[in-house]
Image (cartoon, helix red, strand yellow):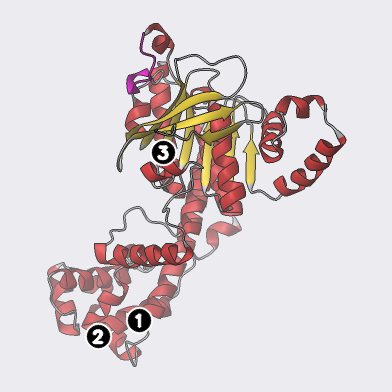
Amino acid sequence: MSTNDLRVPPHSEDAERSVLGSLLLDPQGITKIADFLSESDFYRQPHRLIYRAIESLAARNQPADLMLVIDELERSENLDAVGGAGYLGMLGHEVPTSVNVRYYAEIVKRNATLRQVIDGAQALSDLAYARGADADAVVSRAQELLFQLAANTDSGNYQHVRDLLGPFVDDLLKRREEGQLLAGVHTGFTRLDEILGGFQASDLITVAARTGIGKTSFLLNIAWRAASLHDVPVAIFTLEVSPKQLTQRLLSMQTRIDSTKLRDADLTDEEFGIVGIEAGNLSEVPIYLDDTPALTELQLRSKARRLKLDHHIGLVIIDYLQLMRPHREQENRVQQISQITRALKQLARELDVPVIAGAQLSRAIEMRTQQRPRLSDLRESGSIEQDSDVVIFLYPEGGDLPHSGPVELTIEVAKHRHGQTGIVDAIFVREFGHFLAREPAPQY
């Protein structure tokens, strides 16, 4: 037996007795602590039974005074197990006032959380020692546990609408005073912001296009504008283009110098000067790049959680979805993509940030006379449509891209779970990767 096995788990018997004594003095005290303290938070089993009796009385709208608690414990045949009526009477006399009941309860809760960490660590140790243990699964479980504890989250908590209305109205007033009318992350396009209200926290947004249409550049435009113009930290997981190439594209956007000239160092003295200045500016932009090949959903969650904790990222971008692989191999590709899209939606909710995933459209669209994409063109799985809160299509006028010059593209919101759909006309300037809104032609 190790020395660790002999250590007593964190607890405070004094705090537990003080909580129970306070509740016996003030039967209404349960309303001050029931929102965060539960029976399982008590270390001693007799204290759990007493708290359970008090909760049961409160649930029936009966006052939890000393006599009624004794009666409740007798009816459940637990009175002797808690130490009898004498122990309950002692609890009521130990605490001079019930004013500090919430403070005592917070001590109990804090120790319960420490015990949860210990239990979780033991469970993780058992997983790691198991024959054939999956390292990625163990690491993901560990980070999930620590992230939830650090964020103090509990997916089981209910909230009354009155508790949500206050912060919502406060946010409205704050954004109105600051002139920040969007609730979400700016898309970079006024019309697209009008349709979506910005990219919303906890939403999964899919941006789909055929190969070679400019999907990566569009995603990079979103990231660059959110980070550089609105100071939103962005995480980009790039499975197709190297970080070096993405950095070149970002610098091309920042300087408005042809990306090919940057690649070949074919620059004038003036352009070199611009590059030096703008490289310094770009280095301050909060964009984080990760190019883990064949990224799994477990690896993505692990990395995104760490970025959220370390850098408070407000937007996650994956380029692109079909290049990810599932942590556990499925029988067919449709099941694999379904597993990945569910994980992306869960990640958006867990981190409370928008998650944007690039996606390829199937080649079936090329066989049609009308090459405007449909939701059924999302390649390899209907789960992409089902799990996405927003689906955006990117496609050129006439179906094909010209070989040179600015390209007229349509940005279509084909699905919007929370509101309207619509179309944004844009111009893609390929030389330096910019997407610009296309103004409608004047009417005479």
Q: Residue at (27%, 71%) from the top-left corner?
A: 51
**Percent from the top left, x then y, of residue 261?**
77, 26
Whether label 2 touches label 1, CB < 8 Å: yes
User: What whole-number distance in Å separates the C-alpha atoms at marks 3 and 2?
Assistant: 47 Å
**Percent from the top left, x then y, of residue 81?**
25, 70
Query: In this view, which residue lies farthest toward the top?
Result: 367
Type of amino acid at the residue the image marks with label 3: Leu
Determine crowd level at label 1: few under 14, some 14-19, many 20+ residues with C-alpha closer than 10 A. Answer: many
Query: In this view, which residue lies farthest toward the right?
Result: 269
From the image, tell me which residue sits under label 2: 26
Magenta span includes 242: no
Determine crowd level at label 3: few under 14, some 14-19, many 20+ residues with C-alpha closer than 10 A. Answer: many
Q: Residue at (70%, 45%) from the top-left corner?
A: 282
**Percent from the top left, x then y, of residue 128?**
55, 39
Type of amino acid at the residue the image marks with label 2: Asp
Tell me the quarter of the picture where residue 163 sits.
bottom left
Whether label 3 touches label 2, CB < 8 Å: no
Q: Answer left or right for 213 relative to 93.
A: right
Nearest to the observer: residue 189 or residue 196: 189
Q: Answer left or right for 246 relative to 217.
A: right
Read off the magenta span: 369-377
Sequence-wise first label, 3 or 2: 2
Nearest to the observer: residue 84 or residue 336: 336
Magenta span includes 372: yes
From the image, tell me which residue sits under label 3: 204
Magenta stretch prevailing secondary structure: loop
From the image, tell me which residue sits under label 1: 101
